[in-house]
Amino acid sequence: MQLQFASFQLFFTHAPHCVFFSGHPIRGPASLCAGALGLTAGFIAAYQNSSARLLGYAENAKEAAADEKFHQKARAATVAQNPANK
């Protein structure tokens, strides 16, 4: 057992391809972890941006103007359908 371990250690520590073998098992899990962290960070950034706009902490004039135009058209359509609701 001692001799087998010594030859295994000697082969993988002094061979030119030891860098490839030592880094290979880490590549898959590392890329999955990096992808998961990236997706999580992207979701949190988008959530923070939309929350700030909806709560009024960030500039929201463009969306407010579009919303006001929508409500004006809806009111005009309601009045056109039923003139008694003026």
Image (cartoon, rainbow, N blue to C red):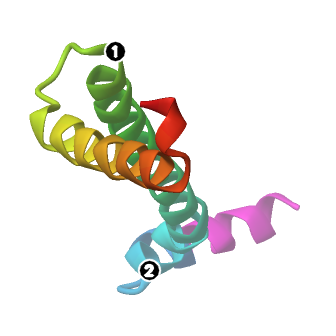
Residue 63 horizontal/vertical position (percent): 22, 42
Question: What label sits on residue 55 in the rendered view?
Answer: 1
Secondary structure found at label 1: helix
Q: Quadrant of residue 86?
A: top left
Whether residue 6 is situated above or below residue 43 in the rendered picture: below
Relative to 52, 60 lies left or right: left
- Residue drawn where x is 52% and y is 77% of the image: 21
33 in relation to 44, above or below: below
The image position of residue 16, as x and y in percent, is 35, 85
User: Mark 2 against mark 1, which lies toward the viewer?
Assistant: 1
Identity of the residue drawn at 44% across and 80% down: 20
The N terminus is located in which quarter? bottom right
Asked whether 6 falls inside the magenta stretch, the response is yes
Question: At x 49% / y 64%, what residue is drawn?
Answer: 31
Q: Is residue 69 or residue 16 the one in the foreground?
A: 69
Locate residue 32 relative to residue 64 in the image: left or right: right
User: Is residue 71 or residue 64 the one in the foreground?
Assistant: 71
Please name the amino acid that badge 2 sits on. Phe
Q: Is residue 78 magenta?
A: no
Residue 55 occupies quadrant? top left
- Asked whether the beta carbons under mark 2 and mark 1 sit within 8 Å of each other, the answer is no
Q: Taken as a whole, is the magenta stretch helix, strand or loop? A: helix
Q: Which is nearer the eye, 10 or 83?
A: 83
The magenta region covers: 1-10
Circle 2 residue: 20
Q: How many numbered circles does the render carry? A: 2
Taking the view exactly as shown, the residue that stands out farthest to the right is 1
Indicate the position of residue 22 as horizontal and vertical percent values: 50, 68
Dot 2, how many residues are within 10 Å of its Cα: few (below 14), some (14-19), or many (20+)?
few
Q: Could you tell me which residue is drawn at 79 percent across and 70 percent down?
A: 4
Mark 2 vs 1, N-terminal side:
2
Q: Residues within 10 Å of mark 1 (few under 14, many from 20)?
A: few
